[in-house]
Image: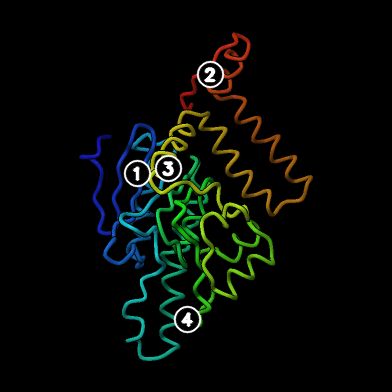
Amino acid sequence: MTDAALPTYETIRLHAQGAVAVITLNRPQRLNAAPPQMFADIHAALQQLPAIGARALLITGEGRAFCSGADLQGRADAPSATSRGANAYKALTEVYSPTMMAISRLNIPVVTAVNGVAAGIGCSLALASDFAVAARSAYFLEAFVNIGLVPDGGATWMLTRLVGKARATEMMMLGERIPAEKAEAWGLIHKAVDDAELMGQAMALAERLAAGPTRALGLMRQGIARALEQSYAEALMMEATHQMIAGDSADAREGGMAFLERRKAVFKGE
């Protein structure tokens, strides 16, 4: 499918670069602050990935921000704290959370190119990838405590597992910026790179993943997520099941032949 044939969206852009699908958050005038419509657009774009033939997904932001959080504009006009809370609950359960879950369930690798601030739900989105690559000028921020709210978008689950209880508590309860290089040192992200190199390195990584054994990578992705909640015995059984599925793939046969023939495998995602 060509870019011209792809749907257009109100708040994002979707295009294909070879086997890599690219979603660009596109509200630069608002630092890509995310109203529910943005996450609805992301969710809709995810449904297009099979038609594109995508074997990896790259998510980034337009302009000088990745995503500055949920768009709070207008919340102060709500008639009461109760209605504001109810509206937030509705938006989370009907739009934001289902989109985050859809990303977690993708059967292709996901890379995020964090080109600026990733705050609130934007931080959750940035860290929902398998590989978060951040510009050195970028930072991560759980700002909820500063406005009397609690982290969302899966942040409490995600941060605790990524960096441990103490650092997750620091991020959530103090609400201070975590610069990209500190995030890398903590193990919060894959790596920090010079700003000018961000898109080149993120795309190169996405293309490398897209050229890999797609079925096996998708099973790895699901296995890593599930292993965080499984017993050792359950993980062993899951691995055996996934190995049975991967072992019957064309890519596994190609990998075996390439090893025997002492050449580089050419995977086709089959």
Q: Nearer the viewer, residue 206 or 97?
A: 206
**Disc number placed over residue 147 in the picture, else none:** 4
Mark 4 crowd level (few <14, some 14–19, many ≥20, 10 Å Cα): few
**Disc number placed over residue 48 in the picture, else none:** 1
Distance from the alpha carbon under mark 1 to that under mark 2: 28 Å
Distance from the alpha carbon under mark 3 to that under mark 4: 33 Å
**Disc number placed over residue 202 in the picture, else none:** none
Residue assigned mark 3? 57
Q: From this viewpoint, which residue is outermost toward the bottom?
A: 80
Distance from the alpha carbon under mark 2 to that under mark 4: 52 Å
Distance from the alpha carbon under mark 4 to that under mark 1: 36 Å
Q: Secondary structure at mark 3?
A: strand
Q: Is mark 4 in CB contact (under 8 Å) with mark 1?
A: no
Residue 145 vertical placement versus 43 (above, below)? below
- Give the residue displayed 49% in from the left and 19% down from the top: 266
Three-letter code for the amino acid on which mark 2 is drawn? Ala
Distance from the alpha carbon under mark 2 to that under mark 3: 22 Å
Q: From this viewpoint, which residue is outermost toward the top?
A: 261
